[in-house]
Amino acid sequence: MTKIEEIVQGVLNGDRRSIARAITIIENNTAETQKLIASIYPHTGKAHIIGITGPGGSGKSTLIEKIIRKYRQKGKTVGVIAVDPTSPFTGGAFLGDRIRMQELSTDQGVFIRSMATRNYMGGIAKATKDAVKVLDATGKDIIIVETVGAGQSEVEIIKVAQTIVVICAPGLGDEIQAIKAGMMEIADIFVVNKADRENADKALMDIQAMLQLNNKEKAWKTPILKTAALTGKGVLQLVEKIEEHKHFLEKELERKRSREKAEAELTEAIKEKVATSIIEDLKREGKFEEFLQKILEKEMDPASAAEKLLNERFRKQV
Amino acid sequence: MQSKRKIRILIAKPGLDSHDRGAKIVARALRDAGMEVIYTGLRQTPEQIVETALQEDVDVIGLSILSGAHKTLFPRIMELVKQKGLTDVMVFAGGIIPEEDIPEMKKLGIKEIFGPGTPTETIVQFVFEHIPKRT
Ligand SMILES: Nc1nc2c(ncn2[C@@H]2O[C@H](COP(=O)(O)OP(=O)(O)OP(=O)(O)O)[C@@H](O)[C@H]2O)c(=O)[nH]1
Ligand SMILES: [Mg+2]
């Protein structure tokens, strides 16, 4: 076995060191990266991916810790990718999201990885997406991606998720700014955290007004929830909403599949009917027999015969 | 394509110390030197520290301790490092560790021990010079 094959096997067996190594290979973007992803890809697609974004200090990591605990109570395994920015000047990064989740670091049903944005050629969105694939392939039921909602690139990262939760908190002075940056459009669920603070309700009302406009034409109406991540208040309701959104997506997918199936069946049925009716006509007119003879006498091949017959027929009709 | 491998380093605080000023200063210096620094916060158990090092796939672990519990905590940490197969991870320590304990700590596999007041440049340079090779 090559080194990559060994790592892939380890990931599929849930070996934590292999998972960690696989993500490093993705981060370092070497010649081996593509091979690794190709081997892992067939084993992905089972996890539900949740994106959590919002301004710095709004309480994302604290809330994620509480969300993980809820999922663990339900017997689900959880993977986390916490993304923090790389300094453009030094290339270094301070990755501090795990501070709020350290109690869970020894839980074998949880895997937490910090990633810096670096200066990826393919963009951090691709590296994050691939790291998520590793956690998916290893069998994590729920994967949570944390990013700071600051600019366009962050909006891109969070698109790896199926359910996007946008968090804001009162007192940061940028509740509205978060919305301006395009966060409102991508939110499947909106959360006002730090509900224990006095101006939480005002933030809630401001955002609710804007959400209503946004929700008008959407099949899924983005709800707004209040949480207090430090105490865990409202977290159960948040997890329930996430599950509701997951079911919504599944139903949407089912609807889309049913539609595609019906479309294919209708197309098939029309083809069949049209062909039968044309052939019957041609037989009645004697044309069918005439061309059949030509084919038998090798004057014509069946494909050219069909083309000529149909050309004549439809020119006549015009 | 990434030309140079990024160095990932865990700065961890085992034991019951009530502040982490020193650890944070070192963490910042390492970040400013271009490394990716994962920080755990206070009061970490040896299990938490080594599990974190494993999940984050770090090249280096820096332990910061003031409480004097190094004699029980460091052997446990180094035991777990070996147990989990993190043999290519370099471990160093800083904080308040009496001179006479240093040889014993180094025998555990801790590469270097920095006393209080060590200039951060010294630590940064040491780390750069002792990055383990990876196969
Ligand atoms: N009062 C109050 N404080 C909170 C709440 N949730 C989080 N905090 C505090 O807010 C600060 C930031 O929390 P984090 O969870 O680190 O926030 P974050 O959004 O992950 O921050 P970055 O990753 O730096 O963007 C911490 O000091 C938390 O203790 C809450 O519900 N109420
Ligand atoms: Mg955070």
Image: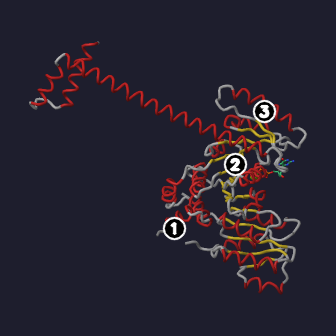
Q: Chain of mark 3?
A: A
Query: Residues under labels 1 and 2: Cα distance?
Result: 31 Å
Q: Chain of mark 2?
A: A
Mark 3, residue position: A207
Task: From the viewer's side, name the closer residue of B61 and A318.
Answer: A318
Question: Residue visible at 56% across and 37% down?
Answer: A253
Query: Residues under labels 3 and 2: Cα distance?
Result: 20 Å
Depth-wise, is mark 1 or mark 2 nearer the camera? 1
Task: From the viewer's side, name the closer residue of A279 and A223.
Answer: A279
Q: Position of residue B47 (x, y in %)?
A: 74, 70
Mark 1, residue position: A6
Whether discs 1 and 2 lie on one chain: the answer is yes
Whether discs 3 and 2 lie on one chain: the answer is yes
Relative placement, left or right, of A182 versus A47 is right
- At mark 2, the secondary structure is strand
Q: Chain of mark 1?
A: A
Question: What type is the residue that disc 2 sits on?
Answer: Thr
Relative placement, left or right, of A16 versus B77 is left
- At mark 1, the secondary structure is helix
Residue A168: image quadrant is top right
Mark positioned earlier in the residue sequence (1 or 2) = 1
Q: Position of residue A295 (x, y in %)?
A: 13, 30
Query: Residues under labels 1 and 3: Cα distance?
Result: 49 Å
Residue B15: image quadrant is bottom right
**Quadrant of the snapshot with the C terminus of chain A:** top left
Mark 2, residue position: A147
